[in-house]
Image (spheres, coloured by chain):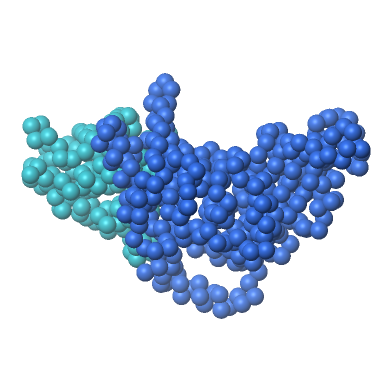
Amino acid sequence: MSVLRPLDKLPGLNTATILLVGTEDAPLQQLADSMLKEDCTAELKVHLARSLPLPCSVNRPRIDLIVFVVNLHSKHSLQSVEESLCHLDAAFFLGKVVFLATGAGRDGHCSIHRNTVVKLAHTYRSPLLFCDLEIEDFRAAMAQRLVRLLQICAGHVPGVSALNLLSLLRGSENPSLEDL
Amino acid sequence: MDSYDAPELTPRQDASSRLKDFFIGATPLQKRLESVRKQTSFIPTPPRRKIPQGSQLQEDVDPQKFTVLLHKQWTLYSLTPLYKFSYTNFKEYSKLLTAFIAAEKKKGLAVEVGDDFDIKVIFSTLMGVKGTQRDPEAFLVQILSKSQLPSEHKEGKVLWTGWFCCVFGDSLLETVSEDFTCLPLFLANGAETNTAIIGTWFQKTFDCYFRPLAISSFNLSWMAAMWTACKMDHYMATTEFLWSVPCSPHSLDISYAIHPEDTKALWDNVHKTPGEVTQEEVDLFMDCLYSHFHRHFKIHLSATRLVRVSTSVASAHTDGKIKILCPKYLIGVLAYLTELAAFQIE
């Protein structure tokens, strides 16, 4: 069973790898391009995938952060993400998984309710970010944020680990979400 | 667990209940702020809705009067509460509106109220189009063309129809003070220019605001499930769905027509809780349709956008167009639309 594990490979020297998972190619590609434009002291590697499990044949470095992109306009993307989540080792959910919901701006096109993604992120105890990946400025801001998150998850920031960050992010969320 | 109360659990509930005790005679503005504050956590969606019941029309109402509302395509707007609107001043409103329309049509010339025009505006109440006793009465506005020969006294052709209603608008009615009449749903049929003129007059006279009401794919799938759940003696139309696939250069439209009895059978299999519809049932119902389509055509309909739903009860388009076919479930359909309009106003 090709389950992705967070610590089964040695980290590369001065590299940070992020995996973007989502059904639509174009927004992922654009987000990847924006991320690569960002300033980063380490070498950034961005991997894209439509769904998990990833093919075993490829020799890939250790993945530090996984971002699941859910398009609120398409139920298919949510179903694909839910199926992919089964192929992740539980240790990944200690701060190395982030959910990104796109398309919330155009409410008329949404076929998934916001609550559904909020519940999904809450079930997996992972942070949920909202960003309209179609708009360039928002995408650039999100790319910057993801690069910072990636640096922390790859261990490049002294004193902060992925797990620290997770509890920090969770503390700032609305406390009523705990009751969902 | 009632999910409606979930966002208000401790500690916020303690604070708000203490606040409520303090402000026993809270003004409508304070009530409004309270309700807005409760909703800031996330958009509340009731996970369950009541299936429209057929017997909600009051008995003293003549169902013949509703024929003007059925089988016509209405464009939906949401409307903020009307200030100092009175049901007794209909004649005056008719005169003023007629003069206004005539003035707009002949821009630049002076027009006097009471002159003989070639159009006539009629305001009338629609008795029985309401959910509870608290809902304000619905009223209808029609523009008729007057026949040229006054001796004939024949009613002219209806050029434009619009009606305002509020069905089960309790959440909005609580927060509104006495001077305001709350009729959040406006439906119009006829030329766009007339709708614009009438909208301008209402906005000027009653200090309200119209906004086109679009129906999202999420709400369309809820409507499909709720209308399929309605018990019908005989089906007038096939159940039809229309999806829009975003692709360049022109978007592709996929239309899926199902025999209404088959959809009812599918719904009966999915439906568990009597009398109510839950989010899971709606999702399961739509997923069954999607997987059936995928099995035959290998197309993921869930990746496309639901644009139109058409059943024997009513048909709705995402641009905010609705056509009601069944008088029995008129109130049920309007209840959902009122909810959407009220949500848009807030």
Kindly give the residue lying farthest to the front in the view shown.
B234
**Residue beneath the point at 31% across and 45% down:** B288
Q: Colour of chain B?
A: blue
How far across and how far down the image is residue B48, in percent? 42, 60
Count the numbered circles shown: 0
Question: Which residue lies at the image location 68% right of the left edge and 33% below the top edge?
Answer: B191
Residue B101 picture quarter: top right
Q: Quadrant of the C terminus of chain B?
A: bottom right
Q: Residue at x 55, y 65 (%)?
A: B34
Question: How far across and how far down the image is residue A128, in percent?
Answer: 33, 50
Position of residue B262 measured from the top left corner of the image (x, y, whole percent): 36, 45
Residue closer to the observer: B75 or A153: B75
- Spot occupied by residue B125 in the image (x, y as percentages of width and height): 73, 55
* Residue A109 in the figure: left or right of residue A44: right
> In this rendering, does residue A68 appear at all?
no
**Figure check: B285 above or below A142:** below
In the rendered view, would you say B130 is above or below B91?
below
Query: Which quadrant: the N terminus of chain B?
Result: bottom left
What colour do you see for chain A? cyan
Left or right of B219? Residue B21 is: right
Compare residues A32 and A36 and report the one nearer the observer.
Answer: A32
Horizontal side of residue B142 vs B111, given as left or right: left
Picture quadrant of residue B180: bottom right
Residue at (76% x, 36% y) in the render: B157
User: Does residue B48 appear to the left or right of A30 in the view shown?
Assistant: right
